[in-house]
Amino acid sequence: MKVNPDQCPLCGQGTLEQLTLMDVWGCQKCRHLFEWNINKQMLKVVDLSPAILWRWNGRFWQRGQNSLLPLTPGLVIGAIALATLPSLLLGIANYIFPPLPGSPFSWFPIVWQGLALVIHGACMGWVMAEAYQFSPYLRFKIWLRRQFSA
Ligand SMILES: [Zn+2]
């Protein structure tokens, strides 16, 4: 796969264009801003915190060292725990204090537990995707922007 040096390494779809009267470059697809050090062949996204760095290796942008916290197994386990713990607590409460048999809202604890799992999982997934700028998430954001701009 041939990659041009002006192709956005963050979303992989847009091209980088220098903004008028500025030392930054912008991607027209994901709309992030980049600082391009041509002498060092390095690209740094400046509107994300922590910034992400890439180095041009002659064929493609290679993600370099940055201050982004590495995605370790401990971090993944912590995120899964934060997403599942509320649902687990609701399940324990439902087990200890089960609804009366035949009561009209006996289905409610199970639905509440499922909703807690889905919503907390979605929140953790969104936080992780925003922090690590996963490529499928960026493509989804671009697709979403296209749907609403048309
Ligand atoms: Zn882009």
Image: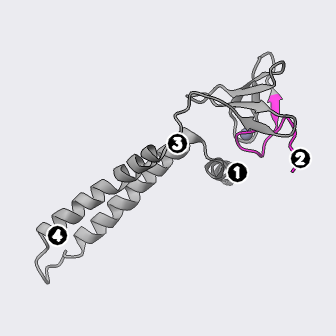
Q: Nearer the viewer, residue 56 or 12?
A: 56
Say which element carries label 4: helix
* Picture coordinates of residue 129, whole percent (x, y): 54, 46
- In the image, which disc is placed on residue 2? 2
Mark 4 to mark 1 CA distance (whole Å): 46 Å
**Does the CB distance between marks 3 and 1 fall below 8 Å?**
no
Say which element carries label 3: loop
For marks 4 and 1 on the same chain, the one whose residue lies earlier in the sequence: 4
Q: Quadrant of residue 84?
A: bottom left
Mark 3 to mark 4 CA distance (whole Å): 35 Å
Q: Main secondary structure of the magenta part?
A: loop
Q: Quadrant of residue 107?
A: bottom left
| Identity of the residue furthest to the front in this view | 73
For marks 1 and 2 on the same chain, the one whose residue lies earlier in the sequence: 2
Circle 3 residue: 71
Q: Amino acid at mark 2?
A: Lys
Other-residue count near label 3 (Cα within 10 Å), few / some / many at <14 / 14–19 / ≥20: few
Q: Amino acid at mark 4?
A: Tyr
Residue segment shown in magenta: 1-17
73 w.r.t. 27: above or below? below
Q: Quadrant of ligand 1?
A: top right
Residue 121 on the magenta segment: no
Q: Nearer the viewer, mark 3 or mark 1?
A: 3
> Which residue lies at the image location 49% right of the left edge and 48% below the top edge?
126
* Picture coordinates of residue 57, whole percent (x, y): 82, 34
Q: Nearer the viewer, residue 6 or 1?
A: 1
Circle 1 residue: 146
Say which element carries label 2: loop
- In the image, which disc is placed on residue 95? 4
